[in-house]
Image: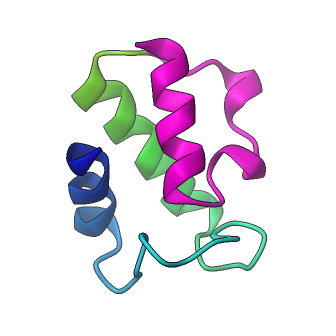
């Protein structure tokens, strides 16, 4: 999902999202980053993530975020 990767790189260009796991659990992303990512995902993909889905395991990797988006599309 190239659009997701582009979105993430705009928010945090210093992170290698394709090769980094444990983005939240490893303290690579903080809560402000996650909020920014959620807002951008909602806006760019025309979805509204449920609060129950905003948990670390859904934002720990690029693959987890892709899976979350696919759940809503």
Image quadrant for the N terminus?
A: top left
Residue appearing at x 40%, y 81% in the figure: 16
Q: Is residue 51 magenta?
A: yes
Nearer to the camera, 30 or 14: 14
Vertical arrangement, residue 32 with respect to residue 55, above or below? below
- List x then y, in percent, for residue 34: 55, 53
Residue 40 relative to residue 58: left or right: left
Give the dominant element type of the magenta stretch: helix, strand or loop: helix
- List x then y, in percent, for residue 45: 28, 24
- List x then y, in percent, for residue 58: 67, 44
Q: Is residue 13 magenta?
A: no
The stretch in magenta equals 48-73
Residue 45 relative to residue 30: left or right: left
Residue appearing at x 63%, y 59% in the figure: 31
Residue 33 relative to residue 26: left or right: left
Vertical arrangement, residue 55 with respect to residue 60, above or below? above
């Amino acid at each position: 999902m190239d659009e997701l990767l582009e979105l993430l790189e705009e928010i945090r260009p210093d992170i290698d999202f394709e090769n980094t796991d444990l983005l939240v659990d490893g303290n690579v992303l903080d809560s402000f980053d996650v909020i920014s990512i959620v807002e951008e995902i909602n806006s760019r993909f025309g979805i509204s993530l449920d609060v129950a889905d905003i948990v670390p395991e859904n934002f720990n990797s690029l693959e987890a975020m892709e899976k979350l988006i696919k759940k809503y599309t």
